[in-house]
Image (cartoon, helix red, strand yellow):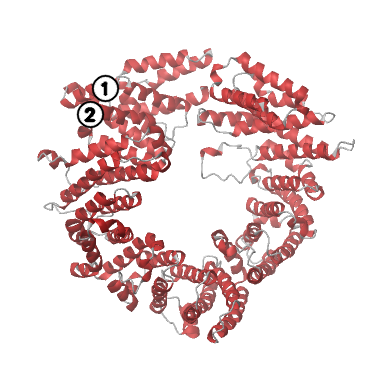
Amino acid sequence: YGAIYACNQLYELIIKKWNEFSLNNKKHIRNFLLTHLGKRGAVYDRNAKVYIYKILGAIVTLGWDDHPDNKSFPDLINQYFIKPTKPELMIIGLQVLAHVIDEVNMARKHISISKHCKLTRSFRDSSLRSVFSTAHFSFRQITQMTNGLPPQMIHDIARCSLELIHKVLCYDFEASFLFSANDRSTVKIPSTWIIFFQDSDLIDLLWKQFFMVDTPDLQILVGKILARCAGIQRSSFSSESEQEKYIQKYMVGIMQACRHPVEFLLKNREVYHEFGRILFRLSMTFNIPTISSAPAYREFIETIAHFTGQICQTMDYGHASLYYIISFWKHMLPLKSYLGMDDNILFLAPHINKVVNDFVLSRLAYAEMVFNNPNMENPLEDHTTIEQITTYARLCHCNLENTIQLFTMQFDRIYMQYTTMVENRQNDKTLELFEQQLTWLIYFFCPILGKQFVMKSSMHETSEKMDGELTARVLRLNSFMKNRFKLGPRHLVLERLEMAIISFFKSFSMIYLSQDNPRMFYEVMNHLIGLREKLAILAVIVAKIKANLNFWAESSTIIKETMELFSHLIVNSPSKSLCSRLPDIGTLLHNHSDESIFPFLRFSCNLRYRRAYFRSIAFMLFVYRKDEMEFLAFVEGVNKRIHHILAMPIPEFQDHLFQINGLLRDIRGISEACVSNTTYAYFFNWFIMKHAEKLMSKIIDHLHFDADMMHHTLNLIREIVEPRGYRMRFSHSSPNGIYLFKIVSNLLCKYTPILNSSKVTNEGIYKKRYRLISKMMKILSVTLSGKICNFGVFEVYNDPCLVNVLNAVVRLALSIPKDDMLTYPKITRNFFGLIEILFHHFIELTIKFDSDIFVQLVSSLEHGIALSIDSLSTDVCETIRSLTKYYLLERPKNTFYSQRIVEHLQHNPQLFDRILEALLRIVMFETAGAITSISAAILPLIVLNPEHYHGFVIETLNGIPNGARRVKMKEAFTKLMKDITLDLTQLNQTQFTKNLLHFKMVCTDVL
């Protein structure tokens, strides 16, 4: 343990104090540890060796440009450690190289992104190939060794070699960590590396070991490497014929694996999973014409089709891995779009049809297995499985008529047995089996709907006809479910069936309710169930929504999905005008708050869905019924609850938290539906003018200890000031904007001292304090930027409400420690968003703050400059520009505000200078995305204090030891200020931005 502790402390010391070590000390530590490993590594403690490896990796990585020996380190390891005659040293050398790669790939906080990017590319170009060659050599040697090494030693060398190969293939070849959207599954090796995979024996050797190794860990590693190699980008190959040869190697290996007994792959879940990834990566990486041109293509397809059928029969194993295999078939299907109806597609279609049949029947059989063995894993419990079902839709459309025939035949068989049992009132466990099977089938129906996978316009009518066949059966089952509900009780399997029906209605509404009546679809619907138009189907869906809000009142899962369907129909669907003609919509509008009709309102598990419920109903009200009297009639039930809560005695107030919480959510939902100027005026006259301040003041006074209640109260305040669309454009003679702001100001000022004085432990500080402060900052930002009124009127008439709320919220925001604030992205965004508004639109009021507040606000900009979020750093730079530009314009006039800024700066004279230095360091050492915004902030700071800028230049140049680099940087600083004058004209700013871009490129190369 002493060695482990010493190594750990040395590693931490090297990471944190790297620049304090001399070159000789670094070299001495590295050489000492290598010598120590060479002499005692074989008998050294395994955990201690790991720390030594990390130390060596850190020294090589951090000192990559300091000494040539670091760049030759992999060659040094290869020379002294990779010796087949000394297997113990061989293991140590492979492990050292693996940890070096880990350290190179590791992004560190104290290393800039640009420097890290430069390091990864330099290591790739100079050393990574030799590391890969070493790993390949070691793996080949150990597979050929027959000199009587112990089996464990052979196993360890093979494992270390494979791990090193895998780490190299997972290397960030193009520093793609800079781009979150980059496809990291593609292995973008340098073009010179292709010889390892194309002409060498690596792939053949890996497949050979995949079948020979008898330990799962090695087989899994081989599978991972093969999966990575299957993802090598196509552009690495010189021609399509080379791609075909490479694919042929994989086809041979895959076919050999598939011809083994299926237990060979299924004996270990991870091995099977990696094999599925190999198939998936191969189909994703290479073009279908290239794959189909490989000599073994037809045999390969036949083998995989047979293997897929076997896997589908093995139903209790690896659902995610099966998804990879099905995805392979999906990627094979676009062959039709490349080659048309030629021999290849005619050959491929029956195999895909067989795969679809095998998979669908296997899911039905699997439902029966789950029914007989409740301890088995049920994929329907995993939402990911349901999302993956969309993968199979493309396969189903390959031969749509056969697929629909399979679905309808299976559905009709199960439905007939199911209805017979329900009509005979046989409420036994067999019903659950049928319900599970129907659930699977309906989930299969959902992604098939529509024409997104139909490749020929002549097939559109056929697709509509098939959709009608499926829709009619689901609607028939839906209408029958009321008979099933009478048998009771409600259970999880029945709930899943209901979820599947809702999911089908969602898919249907997104496809068929957003287009004109398709002729063939409604002909089939009329023939099967007598529904001949869109309105009739809408009536069925709305009735289903209404029934779910009643029967499934205690199931938050179904209520959630039902609310999403309802919201789509009413808010987003083009058919919302048709919905207003339905009787059930009238029932909802007139009885929306009646808990006897909609009992889901009584349960706390549904609180979060009340907002969506009232938003949808209020939106429906506004579709055609826009009279204010009808709106007042609509909110009468909510109005009564408001009066009831306002009249409630204080001792009883805390006993009705559920009712108060529900009321806040209901009002918020109604406000969200008021998207026009007219409807918002109704809401303003009803709630804001009469109830808002009284209701929320009472909640703040008596429920301020409840953080959740205050969160919902602040959410409602945020909603009523949200300038959604054009709803808050008050008329020129209207005082409503001023009245609204005074209400918000009074509420925030009332709550601020309460929150400021509350004592909160560190454990719950985010929920009970930081989250609420963040919400208040957002409310103030939205209010100040919403142009709800002319804020200058408050100063003219000596109304302190604006100054009071600014002081209250800003002081509360600054009470959050900087480290804590930067830990939570949402708080960070709201804080810097508020500062940007203050300095851009209310700078004179901000300058009037006390010096301690003003200095803290400007100092926070220094922290905000280094934020990794581009949009935030842009806001911070814009704030700096606004402040410095205002100061430069006011300083010659010697105005009150310029004098006030001088007074503030006396408390921190170097404030602007530190911000300038921080901005320049970002340009010099970081990957700065918003260079235009940074330029707009830097120039005013230089104009403000050019002497400090020149001092910074001299200090920076003196800190560069290399003479050639110092000369280049001196030229770069000279060119940065070329043709620049000390003013803020637009022409001057444009020229400075151009100079800064060139300066940035020079810094990237030199530093």
Looking at this rendering, what residue extends furthest in the front direction? 651
Q: Residue at x 25, y 59 (%)?
A: 676
Mark 2 sits on what residue?
A: 850
The picture places residue 424, in percent across and down from the top left corner, at 55, 87
Mark 1 sits on what residue?
A: 905
**Of the two numbered discs 1 and 2 in the rendering, the one whose residue sits closer to the viewer:** 2
**What amino acid does circle 1 point to?**
Leu
Left or right of 784: which side holds 461?
right
**What amino acid does circle 2 point to?**
Asp
Q: CA distance from mark 1 to mark 2?
A: 12 Å
Give the mark, 1 or 2, whose residue is nearer the N terminus.
2
Q: Which mark is residue 33?
A: none
Q: Quadrant of residue 802?
A: top left
Q: In terms of secondary structure, where does tag 2 sit?
A: loop
The residue lying toward the viewer, choosing from 249 and 346, is 249
- The vertical placement of 35 against 862, above or below, is above
- The vertical placement of 246 against 562, above or below, is above
